[in-house]
Amino acid sequence: MVQPFTIAIPDERLAEIRLGIARFDWDDFPDAGGWTSGVGLADLRRLADRWLGGYDWRATERRLNALPQFTADILGQTLHFLHVRGDGSRLPVMLVHGWPGSFLEFEALIAPLTAAGHDVIVPSLPGYAFSGRPATPIGPRQTAELFHRLMVELYGAGRYLLQGGDWGAAITAWMAFGHPDAVAALHLNMVIVQAADAVPTRAPELAWAAKRADLAKEEAGYSHEQGSRPQTLGIAMSDSPIGVAAWILEKFGAWADVPRDDAGRPDLWAAFDPDVLIDNVMLYLGPKRFVTSTWMYRGRTLEDSGQFPAGTRLRVPTAVAAFPDPVFPPPPRSQVEKTYDVVRWTEPARGGHFAALEQPESLLADMRGFFDAVSPG
């Protein structure tokens, strides 16, 4: 059953978070080399200072609560989602976030899409934000079934459009795999899941694979930890707002397409409003969802959903907006076409891993160009 939902973090929880930030002992924390060894302490402290000195979560709640929000019980899992209606002249669009993002990544895209006639559905992943905590880790393939069932709950047997990046790219791809008759078109700003037999063979494909493997040596530690020992990590983070903020901020600094100095230090503030970054962290801290947010990685391992079965060739029309992600460089089109029916391929000049936050106008224009072509009103 679908129920209206209003965000309301208790005052006691906000006080706990504020106290944890205020009590963090910065003077006792050594710097292992700034951004070369993890999160930059100066940037983290700047975020903490703003958190304590002017940031207003209640203002964020009021802004987010202006958007129609709901929960639904789907296959025993409570899902939180935004559901903003257009005039019904175009197919509904589901926008799916990843980690360490949240539903608010798509905030700037909702009004233009509804104005164009689409209904817009933005779910929180299981164990994220205001979705319920899973009883056990849930991976992208199981999440794909939950999200398809949510669309059936809302629209019956109607067809729908999908957009995803990060985990959203994996989840929406599995939705296209499992329900190709329901998914009218798939728009990705990251390609995660490929067929098991989609092996790089051409020179550009081999160069991409080698670059990804080289980057993984420095950048994949978080994924291995969350995919193998999320419970231990969760215990370490459970009472540390600064710890959670550091774990998340590191990824925004490493994965976003932002200016960097000669030492590789990112200028986060050139791309992100500090309050937006805090809003995103608060969606993990406020409802106590950091621990279960990491379970998606463990769930992928347990359900073995990192690849499609050999021989898979998705028949859903697919667009790829290959943003210049510094840590997850997009594969060449020839590599993606081994698994997906790529009918549109673009390479935006700017924007990294968090395309919806970094370059919302560019992502929106790409989506609309694709959806208008494959599903005209």
Image (cartoon, grey):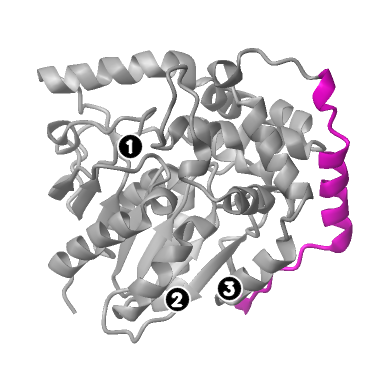
Label 3 element class:
strand
Residue 185 visible, this angle: no
Earlier sequence position, callout 2 versus callout 1 = 2
Give yes or no for contact between labels 2 and 1 (Cβ–Cβ under 8 Å).
no
- Residue 101: x %, y % from top left: 53, 47
- Residue at image position (45%, 76%) is 154
Q: Report the residue marked by disc 3.
A: 69
What is the x, y in percent for residue 296?
55, 40
Q: Which residue is mark 2?
A: 154
Which residue corresponds to the image point at 32% horizontal and 48% vertical from the top-left? 173
Give the magenta part as a residue range: 1-28
Kind of residue at badge 1 = Val
Verify CB contact (< 8 Å) between mark 3 and mark 2.
no
Depth check, mark 3 against mark 2: the one in front is 3
Tell me which amino acid carries mark 3: Gln
Rate crowding at label 1 as few (under 14), some (14 to 19) or many (20 or more) other CA atoms within 10 Å. Answer: many
Q: CA distance from mark 2 to mark 1?
A: 27 Å
Q: Residue furthest bottom?
A: 87
Q: Residue at x 13, y 66 (%)?
A: 373
